[in-house]
Amino acid sequence: MKINKILDAKQLIHINSLIEKLEFIDGKVSASGLAAEAKNNMQANPTGEAFINLSKYIGEVLSKNSWITYRFFPKKFSPAMVNKYSSGQGYGKHFDASHIQTAQSGILRRDFSFTLMLSKSSDYEGGELKIESNDNLVQTVHLDAGDIIIYPSSKIHSVLPVTKGDRIAYIGWISSYIKDASAHETLDMYSNLQEKFQKYNLSTEDELLLRHLKNKLVHLLSE
């Protein structure tokens, strides 16, 4: 699970101007089976002009973000949604389906799920994102505006009930060039090591060798 802030104040001002124009409908329209039973929220009408403009704007931010590219190797971003939780609303335990049908790219595999928070942390209470792991490790986070959290789509997760205010977030999925979870973990460990080396005064040749090895690993482990 990785958290980073990818939106600045100017971007958030523009995004908030679009949020004001969104039309919200019952969130159950995009859920099925057990997920529909657990889901209690609203979502932006995906056919609305404001949502289309917002999705295009944020999509460009995501596709140009070097941290996301460097860490998650996105092949495709699947269609996203904007969810809104008001007081008393939440989303019980659920998991994201392994694949999603898209109009432009056909069926896409969901490797990573992300939540990009659009509400200030001071604007809502409750609403923490809770992510569970197979080893019984539970991580619970309360996100601020501009924060993005990215985690494997295979994880069971939930949104705890909001107790005050409104929690609005942009939700989406990444199909990665790195399909195997162990391969991605290996690349992630290498990236951590590479970042730690930045505190040393490496020569240009040493830096080249580090980057070359990363490139060879990506070539070996990607589809």
Image (cartoon, grey):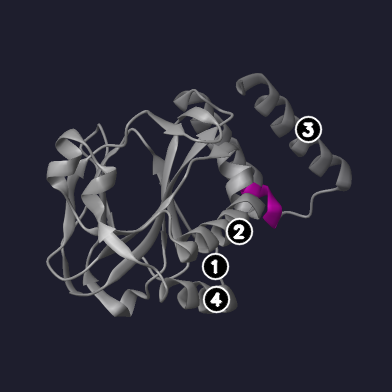
Residue at screen point 49% across, 32% down: 185
Given residues 129 and 82, the one toward you in this image is 82
Mark 4 or 1, closer to the camera: 4
Label 3 SS: helix
Span highlighted in magenta in the image: 195-199
Q: Would residue 53 be counted in the magenta stretch?
A: no
Circle 1 residue: 7
Residue at screen point 54% across, 67% down: 7
Which image quadrant for residue 144?
bottom left
Mark 2 or 3, closer to the camera: 2
Mark 2 or 4, closer to the camera: 4
Label 1 SS: loop
Query: What kind of residue is marked 1?
Result: Leu
Query: What kind of residue is marked 3?
Result: His
The relative height of residue 174 versus residue 84 in the rendered view (above or below) is above
Where residue 197 sits in the image (x, y, percent)? 68, 48
In the image, is 96 to the left or to the right of 54? left
Given residues 170 and 201, the one toward you in this image is 170
Where residue 85 sits in the image (x, y, percent)? 24, 64
**Which label is found at residue 61?**
2
Count of number-bearing discs: 4
CA separation, marks 3 and 4? 39 Å
The relative height of residue 98 versus residue 53 in the rendered view (above or below) is above
Where residue 24 sits in the image (x, y, percent)? 30, 64
Label 4 SS: helix
Identify the main secondary structure in magenta: helix
Query: What kind of residue is marked 2?
Result: Val
Circle 4 residue: 14
Circle 3 residue: 212
**Which label is found at residue 197?**
none
